[in-house]
Structures are given as structure tokens and as C-alpha cells.
């Protein structure tokens, strides 16, 4: 009995153990606890049975829904089969009825694609902007084109041919030289040239706009006259390549840009060439004026003047030289001519030196340009020719500038030297002739 009590004591919760150790009370507590547990178990069992019944109902509803879905799936599958069969039958009927039209429609799509490629950069797109979209739709369509689309395609071809032979005016977006885009009136000369005001325009197909060309070709006055409203004909230079020549003109450097490519050496060559040219022109003008004074003095030898070399040379011997002073007079004339010679030959050596230095400076620029080119090759390789363009441009431009400066300076030096030599010879001839004239006259008087 004690062992049973000990076992029950161990199994009872602490709340029960805290009560007085009365066996009858303990027995009642145990019975009460057991009764409570049995009631809780019955409640859980009741809820489980109720939930089981609900799960059964849900399962039956799900099975019924599944059956309905399967029935609908079978119906749709059967309908799909019927539609597929009808589609195959319709395709076969279409193929049978169309006959060779399928090849014809293929040719139409190919022609639309080729036409779209040709018209992609056409200037006419600015006046007819929707035609490329229609061609793209016709070229990429997988359906047989309708009669309306074929007629629209034919109309676009006819419209292009007609517009290619006309001069039209329309409003289009134009980007000016200031970079601002404006809606301006544009004159289109067929598919070749677009004009605005006195400027030629470049067509940008990606941006669908016109751009004022940075470098305008010759004949801008013709453009201004052509764009004005008139009734008669007018002359105009057009680009038959549909803008390619005008694009090449934008990439061609101007004379000033080519000079800039020569760098510092090019500027030095031009400065020396300008100095030599001005010096040669000044010497030619001075020699021309001196020659005019000498010619005037020859016509009036009795009145010697000091404003010309001949008058100064002849003034040494006087108007009436004596025969016994012949040797002295000749020496005095030679001395006077030698004294006038440096003034007549002044700066000729510098002009010749500049003509000789110019090609040497061009060679210097060529060497420095090639050094820059080889440095670019060393750093970046030969993959991009633009990296070497600067050095090559300097190498070639400086050589050209040196030759352009040297050749005219050589001609100018020859002219200056020939003119001064002619004046010196004239002084010698006039001096010797005057002595012979005076001495011959004196000998006749003595005889």
C-alpha cells in the first residue's frame, strides 16, 4: 500500500502534493483530475470528428471541382483539335486558291525591303516622313498584303519618282550654326540638295533633321538667288551624289587648318617667308624708282642731280674733264661706282638666305613630325591611324610650307639681283660713254 502511495505521489503534479497528505482527499483529487482529463479528451475527440467531417466535405468539393476542370480541359482540347484542323484546312485552301500569288507577295516584301534600304538616307524623307514606316511594315509583315497596301506601295514609288524631279518648299527642323533647332522654310532640289537662306544643308537621318553645313561650297550667292521667290530660271550648284560630296567637304581641312597642322615650325616658316617677300618687294620698288631716276638723268646729262646713282657718279668727273687727267678720272669713276654698288645690292644676301633656310626648316618639321608619329606608334600601336595623323600632318605640311616659301623667294631674289645688276651695268656704260664723249670732243678741238 505504501508503494502505491509513493508511486501516485510521484505522478501527481506539485499543486496536488502541496495539499495535506490525507488519503481520502488525495483520492478525490486524483479522481477529479482524471475526470477533467477524460472530459478534455472527449472534447478533443469531438472536435477531431467534426474537423474530419469538414475535411471529407472539402475533399468531395475538391474532387468535384477537379472533375469539372478535367471535363473543361477535355472540351478545350477537343476544340483546339477542331480549330487546328480547320486552320490546316484553311491554309490548304488558301494555298490552293492563291497559287503563284505567294511568290508574288514574297517579291513584294523583298522589293519593299530593298526600297527601304535605298530610301533610308534619302532627303525626301524630310518631306514624306511616314513612308519609311510603311515600307518597314510591309517588308516585315508575315501576312499576305492586301490590295490597299499594294496600291499604297505603288503610290509611294510613283511619289518618289515625281518628287525626285521637282523643286519643293516645305517646313522642316533645321539646326543652325548656333546649335539651336528651329522650324524653317527649306528648299529641296530633288533628292540631291537642301537649301535654307544662303546655306547648304546636311541631312541627318538618325535625328530626322537638317543641319547647316559648317563648310559651305562656292556659289553661296547663287543659293541666295535660287531660294528667293521668282518666276524665271536660276543657276545653282547641286551635289549629284546626294550629299556625299558635301560630307567630304566637311572633312576636308581648309588652308588655315592645314597651316595649323604644321605647328610652331610651320609658323616660323611662314613668318620668314613673309619677311623675305616684303623685303624683296621693297627692294624691287626701290630699284624701280632708282631706275626711273637714272633714266631721267640720262635724258639730261648736262644737269647732274644727286638723287640718283648716275648723277652722283658723273658728278665726280665734272661736266668738262681734261684729257691729261684720264687715268685719274677712270679711277674716280670706278671708286664712285663701287660706292654705289652696296646700296644697289643691299639685302640680296638676306633674301637668298631666307630662300635657303625655308626648306631646311621644312625638313626640321618633317623630322619632328616623324618623331611624334613613332612615339604614337610606340605608345598606342598601329591600330588607330588617327593617333598618328597629327605627326604625319606636321611632317608633310612643314615640307610643303618650306617649298612654297623657298620657290617664290628664289624667283624674287633673281629679279632683285637682275635689276640691281642692270643698274650697275648702266652706270658703268654711261660713265665710260661720257668720258669717251668728252675726250673725243677735246681731241677734235686740239687737232
Image: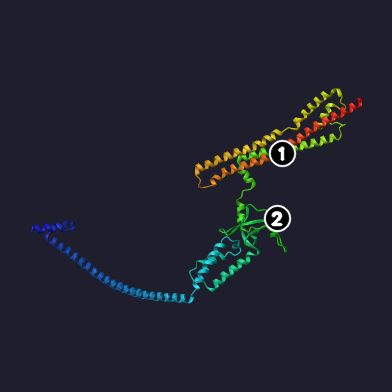
Badge 2 marks a residue whose secondary structure is helix
Residue carrying label 1:
412
Residue carrying label 2:
221
Q: Residues within 10 Å of mark 1 (few under 14, many from 20)?
A: many
Q: Position of residue 8 (x, y in %)?
A: 13, 59
On screen, 209 above or below 380?
Answer: below
Q: Position of residue 322 (x, y in %)?
A: 87, 24
Q: Residue at x 56, y 42 (%)?
A: 391
Q: Is residue 137 visible?
A: no
Q: Position of residue 7 (x, y in %)?
A: 12, 58
Q: Quadrant of residue 207?
A: bottom right
Q: CA distance from mark 2 to mark 1?
A: 37 Å
Badge 1 marks a residue whose secondary structure is helix
331 to the left or right of 192: right
Q: Quadrant of the C terminus?
A: top right
Tell which circle, 2 or 1, labels the residue nearer the N-terminal end.
2
Q: Quadrant of the N terminus?
A: bottom left
Front one among 296 and 6 = 296
Q: Position of residue 89 (x, y in %)?
A: 42, 76
Task: Report the mark closest to the observer, 2 or 1.
Answer: 1
Amino acid at each position: 500500500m505504501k508503494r502505491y502511495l509513493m508511486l501516485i505521489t510521484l505522478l501527481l503534479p506539485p499543486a496536488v502534493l502541496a495539499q495535506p497528505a490525507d488519503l481520502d482527499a488525495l483520492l478525490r483529487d486524483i479522481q477529479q483530475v482524471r475526470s477533467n482529463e477524460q472530459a478534455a479528451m472527449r472534447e478533443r475527440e469531438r472536435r477531431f470528428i467534426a474537423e474530419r467531417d469538414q475535411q471529407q466535405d472539402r475533399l468531395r468539393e475538391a474532387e468535384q471541382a477537379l472533375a469539372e476542370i478535367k471535363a473543361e480541359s477535355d472540351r478545350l482540347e477537343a476544340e483546339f483539335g477542331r480549330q487546328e484542323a480547320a486552320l490546316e484546312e484553311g491554309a490548304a485552301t488558301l494555298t490552293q486558291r492563291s497559287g503563284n500569288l505567294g511568290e508574288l507577295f514574297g517579291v513584294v516584301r523583298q522589293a519593299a525591303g530593298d526600297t527601304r534600304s535605298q530610301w533610308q538616307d534619302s532627303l525626301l524623307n524630310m518631306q514624306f516622313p511616314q513612308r519609311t514606316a510603311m515600307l518597314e511594315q510591309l517588308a516585315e509583315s508575315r501576312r499576305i498584303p492586301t490590295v490597299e497596301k499594294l496600291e499604297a506601295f505603288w503610290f509611294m514609288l510613283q511619289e518618289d519618282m515625281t518628287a525626285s524631279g521637282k523643286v519643293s518648299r516645305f517646313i522642316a527642323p533645321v539646326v543652325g550654326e548656333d546649335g539651336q533647332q528651329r522650324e524653317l522654310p527649306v528648299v529641296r532640289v530633288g533628292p540631291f540638295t537642301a537649301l535654307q537662306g544662303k546655306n547648304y544643308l546636311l541631312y541627318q537621318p538618325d535625328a530626322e533633321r537638317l543641319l547647316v553645313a559648317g563648310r559651305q561650297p562656292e556659289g553661296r550667292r547663287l543659293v541666295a538667288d535660287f531660294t528667293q521667290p521668282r518666276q524665271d530660271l536660276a543657276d545653282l550648284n547641286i551635289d549629284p551624289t546626294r550629299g556625299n560630296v558635301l560630307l567630304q567637304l566637311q572633312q576636308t581641312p581648309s588652308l588655315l587648318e592645314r597651316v595649323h597642322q604644321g605647328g610652331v615650325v610651320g609658323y616660323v616658316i611662314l613668318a620668314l617667308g613673309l619677311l623675305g617677300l616684303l623685303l624683296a618687294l621693297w627692294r624691287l620698288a626701290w630699284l624701280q624708282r632708282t631706275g626711273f631716276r637714272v633714266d631721267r638723268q640720262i635724258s639730261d646729262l648736262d644737269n647732274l642731280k644727286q638723287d640718283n646713282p648716275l648723277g652722283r657718279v658723273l658728278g665726280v668727273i665734272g661736266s668738262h674733264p681734261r684729257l691729261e687727267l684720264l687715268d685719274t678720272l677712270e679711277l674716280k669713276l670706278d671708286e664712285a661706282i663701287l660706292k654705289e654698288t652696296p646700296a644697289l645690292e643691299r639685302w640680296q644676301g638676306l633674301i637668298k638666305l631666307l630662300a635657303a633656310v625655308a626648306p631646311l626648316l621644312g625638313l626640321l618639321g618633317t623630322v619632328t613630325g616623324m618623331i611624334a608619329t613613332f612615339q604614337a606608334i610606340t605608345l598606342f600601336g598601329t591600330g588607330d591611324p588617327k593617333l598618328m595623323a597629327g605627326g604625319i600632318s606636321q611632317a608633310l605640311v612643314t615640307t610643303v610650307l618650306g617649298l612654297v616659301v623657298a620657290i617664290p623667294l628664289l624667283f624674287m631674289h633673281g629679279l632683285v639681283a637682275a635689276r640691281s645688276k642692270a643698274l650697275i651695268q648702266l652706270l658703268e656704260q654711261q660713265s665710260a660713254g661720257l668720258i669717251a664723249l668728252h675726250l673725243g670732243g677735246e681731241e677734235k678741238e686740239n687737232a
